[in-house]
Amino acid sequence: MGKDELLASFLTNIAKEISPTSFTAWFNNLKIVSLTNDSIIFEVPMEIHKKMLGDNYYAMIEKVLKNITNIDYDIDFVLENEIDIPEQVVTNPIISNNDFNTNLNPNLNFDNFVVGDTNRLAKVAAMAVAESPGRIHNPLFIYGKSGLGKTHLMHAIGNYIVANSNRKVLYCTCDEFMTEYTNIANPDNAKNSIEYATEFKNKYRNIDVLIIDDIQYLVGAEKTQQEFFNTFNYLHQSNKQIIISSDRSPDDLKILEERLRSRFMWGLPVDIYPPDFDLRCRIIRKKIENSSIANLITDESIEYIANSCQNDIRFLEGAVNRLMAYTAMIVPKSIDLEFTCEALKDFVNKNIYSNNNITKIQKAVADHYNITIDDLKGKKRSNKVAHPRQLAMYLCRLETDETYPRIGLEFGGRDHSTVIFACDKIEKELETDTNGELERTIKEIKAKL
């Protein structure tokens, strides 16, 4: 089978495996530049394609090629300018700007940014901008609630650009921008206002990449909005990259001038959602992977921390730091669930679950059976309480993503085996529920939810 025929068959099969959007983004421009008995090399248009295809689609590509040819190929991805280079790709020399303060945190990069479904698009967009600043997604507008990784991504973009080019990158917060601008008219400045204004404009315009955090604080600052508008226009017209973050989308920044909001939409607005349970667990494991507690902590403890810090990665990291400090003082043989609860009892908000799904299910079950939530969490074993408790545990497992240990913890600190027993018991009752009474009860409770 020739290269063209193989490529056509390959793309047809890939298109069946993924969404049209993903296909267009990552596979539409692939070419086969080398094909041997055991290897295949694809040409891709940008560096980000190499990263994305290698990290996220390699197994699928391997599988599709095997299905077509029955050959286990060694697969590689190259850029056009790499095709004739037999060994190491020659990169552009890095010119150091030793006298220029980027304000970037060198510890925040793409390698230690943990990716999940809730932030994957933002990561891909950020890498695309880092690869081609000023040419793609300009401006890049990243938005989402506080503590979800927006600032980390912005620093990662800046650090990547600094490490791989001689471009000047400047990171600042919106508050810093506002303070410096308002200081132009401050009579206490050692320099006169004209000199200060000139320095201000040189700082924010004689750069290649402007990264500005928390743009929502421009709300209400009309004169600063005007200056930022002018700075934005100057940089954008010069094909300089602009990266902005906010705790809300451009559409939600109603109080900002319309001309500013419309410019934020010129490029790519991309949002970051709160991390799901799986991502929170992976963030914790990444945080502790080279620490003294890595081999001591149990999966149940990791899941407990992940469930206790659902909406803020900073709070998640704070819990891990607290656990590390407590472990250093106590020096346990193992960091099990009981030890973790003890270590974090004053750190994790006891009311953190007041609005979560488990509480809602407990209330719905308690109301249906005319008992209290305290009854469900208590030690009573009468059938009047025990059966509703088992049903509530079953519904928590069915209707939420919570683990057995987490559910047990919310039912008076019961062991995970108790929750498993309860779920199995309800499932068996449903199998023998000939008159459908239990099934109707479950439907009524679900309706209340």
Image (cartoon, helix red, strand yellow):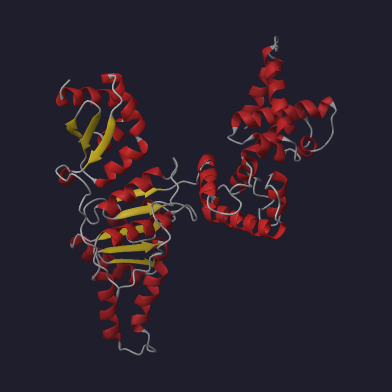
Across and down, in percent, residue 290 comes to: 53, 52
**Left of 52 or right of it: where is 282?**
right
Residue 186: name its quadrant.
bottom left
Q: Which quadrant is the C terminus positioned in?
A: top right
Q: Is residue 37 above or below residue 162?
A: above
Residue at screen point 71% across, 52% down: 332
Residue 179 found in image quarter: bottom left
Q: Nearer the viewer, residue 304 or 263?
A: 304
Asked whether residue 446 appears in the rendered view, the answer is yes
Compared to 432, does 189 lie above or below? below
| Screen quadrant of the N terminus | top left
Most foreground residue, 22 or 322: 322
Which of the two residues, 216 or 92, is positioned nearer the viewer here? 92
Classify residue 46 as left or right of residue 328: left
Residue 137 higher or lower than 74, as above or below: below
**Residue 29 in which image quadrant:** top left
Q: Is residue 16 visible?
A: no
- Residue 325 falls left or right of residue 123: right
Name the residue located 72 percent from the left edge and 46 percent from the top edge: 338
Q: Position of residue 284 (x, y in %)?
A: 55, 48
